[in-house]
Image (tube, grey):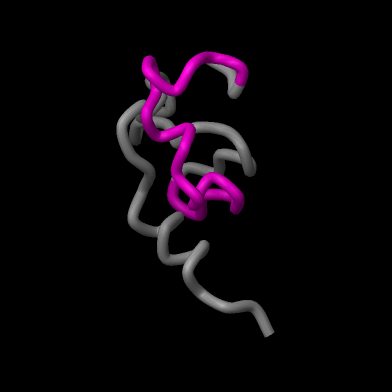
Amino acid sequence: MNAAEPTTTAPALSLPALAVTCPACGSKPGELCTSHSGTRPRRNDVHRARTTAHNTPTT
């Protein structure tokens, strides 16, 4: 799966947290988070840690 796929197949592609690397699974900015085993993309949401990282201001 890549970012070029329509958001109707992966609603998570429209989430602002995709702008940062996921600390939980290591997905790079713009990539969907993966399952804990790393084999399946999380198409409907992102890890809480990624949302927190996105919402935490950098200094």
Name the spot of residue 47 as percent of width and height, x first: 36, 48
- Specify the farthest residue to the right: 59
**What residue is rendered at 43% in x and 28% in y?**
38
Depth check: 25 or 12 in front? 12
Residue 19 lies in the magenta stretch: yes
Q: Splitting the image into 4 quarters, where does residue 34 fall?
A: top left
The quarter of the rendered structure image containing the C terminus is: bottom right
What x and y, as percent, mark residue 58?
64, 78
Residue at 50 percent across and 54 percent down: it is: 23
Question: Which secondary structure class fits the magenta region best?
Answer: loop
Q: Which residues are magenta?
A: 4-24
Q: Quadrant of residue 26?
A: top right
25 in relation to 50, above or below:
above
Q: Establish if 29 lies above or below 56.
A: above
Does the magenta-highlighted stretch encompass residue 10? yes
> Residue 48: percent from the left, percent from the top?
33, 56
How far from the left and from the top, in percent, is residue 57?
A: 57, 78
